[in-house]
Amino acid sequence: MYRNLLFSIAACLSASVCAFSPQGEVQPEIATGRTEIKSATADKFMAVTANPHASAAAEQILARGGSAVDAAIAAQLVLSLVEPQSSGIGGGAFMLSYRADQKKLYSYDGRETAPLAVDENYFMRDGKPRGFLDAVIGGYSVGVPGVMRMLELAHQRDGKLPWKDLFQPAIALAEEGFAISPRLYQLAAQLPRVAARPAISAYLFGEDGKPLPVGHILKNPDYAQTLRQLAGEGARPFYEGDIAAAIVAAVTGDPENPGVMTREDLASYTAKVREPVCGDFLQYRWCGAPPPSSGGTTVGAMLGMLQHFPLQKYEVGSAELTHLFVEASELAFADRNTYSADPDFVSVPTTAMVAPDYLAQRAELINPRRAQPAVAGNPLGFAEQRRTAKSPELPNTSHLSIVDQYGNGVSMTTSIETGFGSRLLVKGFLLNNQLTDFSFTPVNADKQLVANRIQPGKRPRSSMSPTIVFNKDGSLRLLVGSPGGSRIIDYTARTTLYHLAKGMPIADAIHAGNIGAIGHQVEVEPDTLSEAEYGKLEAMGHRVVRKELNSGIHAIAVMDGALHGGADTRREGSAVGR
């Protein structure tokens, strides 16, 4: 069945995609077509992940009585194997974990950190920022990975099954092998400089220099050995043992672009439990990951502004609703770009950015009939005014949503940043390039310090937006998130809006056309609006670009006593449950 699914996906792939958009923006994980709507319904538990192997692993753990966190761990370990271009144990993640027995939501921060030896000019050369591909390939871009410490912390607090049991599905798959999917093949073939380093070239490419074909059975005994060690000893070897030594050797010994990570950087890494950021939308209560993720505040700000408009009047696919969405997004991003950063280094007005009174003021700036320039506000008198600078955050990530039989839920977004990360393969897994999520320039054109500048030990700002929505009685209503770089925020907010405000079934809301507001233009998937509605949108003052938008939205809606799952038709994920 899975092999047939892979070849059906292959039929949808576009051969005309390229690594760079006309505007010159890097597109490191390209769109690979769409399939039919993918949905599932269950009574006891459900898992929605970016790959059928990962969904099956999560389902196996849930069927054995595991918690949502247990299932998320098993899924992540498999994703690191079958979807190495998107996430893995060499990267970072944010997890929201709802404990039904405590009626409490926890936010786990497994974001990477900058090595202690960096300085604010790390990405500058002769007074100018380095080019992205020049910086990303090799050890220079690698941040201290946080996934394994985060998963271990979450398991200690929210797990049920033994830690070692969660590794068995991934170990078995690594040893027995799995069929290379059309998406993995397409990305290996078309993303720039995938085979830039010998280890990844030997793993994913044949002797002829071409990517191994779709259906090739790929085995990874090195990854299996790594997992066996972590299963038996916990995360310690990754941060203090021989795995740590191998990571540092690969980063600092890279022959073309060495980094500065040390054994001390790894040994001192700490995953954190932070207070989720929450707010109201219509009759619901949404919660998201707090800084250094900008996802919670920005998704929340968009929803908080939009609820001040008569949403029931506007249809999905109308210029009017699209315009309101875009304007709310641009205002929310103006604040996000100015204020969001690592709160351990920079004061972030997290609560003020989503305060009801402030969002009401921001909503008043939206003209329902005309596009307006968006500037950052002053969240409830926040004294420290700042300026922004761009960081090349890119859309290579994965999201999973899980609800277990105990009523617990996990919404987790995980990433190695760009496609195939730094291209450094160590002990069977890829290392991230998350340091390029920092602003390359420490000051802006006005010589003011940028909040998201790189500093020793700092976590780069992220757009990962794991989101959980509750009913007013505190029960689970929706778990949602997506990959997509900075576009994650729009993908997550749009799906939430369409499902909760417009009543679309969750799988249909996921499948509906994506909208992206990235400042200089509005990106809309081609079949989102009719020609007449496109004309109206442009008449409102928007510069509209029609293009495929590579989301990976995975969600579970809890309603009518059942779990309704949806997997994004733009990727190869699946929703499974019982």
Image (cartoon, rainbow, N blue to C red):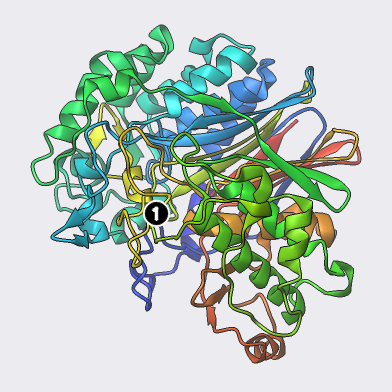
For the N terminus, the quadrant is top right
Question: How many residues crowd around disc 1 within 10 Å: few (fewer than 14), some, or many (20 or more)?
Answer: many
Instruction: Name the residue nearer the viewer: 382 or 177.
Output: 382
User: What residue is drawn where x is 53% and y is 46%?
Assistant: 464
Q: Amino acid at mark 1?
A: Val
**With respect to residue 277, does 406 lie above or below?**
above
**What is the x, y in percent for residue 294?**
55, 48
Residue 163 visible in the displayed image: yes
**What is the x, y in percent for residue 259?**
18, 38
Residue 295 horizontal side relative to residue 435, left or right? right
Instruction: Name the residue nearer the viewer: 268 or 443.
Output: 443
Residue at the left extreme? 255
Residue 348's quadrant in the figure? top right
User: What residue is drawn where x is 25% and y is 20%?
Assistant: 264
Residue 90 horizontal side relative to residue 558, left or right? left
Residue 394 horizontal side relative to residue 565, left or right? left
Instruction: Name the residue nearer the viewer: 256 or 472.
Output: 472
Number of marks in picture: 1
User: What residue is drawn where x is 36% and y is 24%?
Assistant: 175
For the C terminus, the quadrant is top right
**What is the x, y in percent for residue 467?**
67, 43
Residue 569 visible in the displayed image: no
**With respect to residue 117, does 368 lie above or below?**
below
Residue 97's quadrant in the figure? top right
Q: Secondary structure at mark 1?
A: loop
**What is the x, y in percent for residue 3?**
49, 45
Instruction: Name the residue nearer the viewer: 279 or 419.
Output: 279
Instruction: Give the residue number, with chain letter if any, for mark 1.
Output: 450
Residue 1 horizontal side relative to residue 440, left or right? right
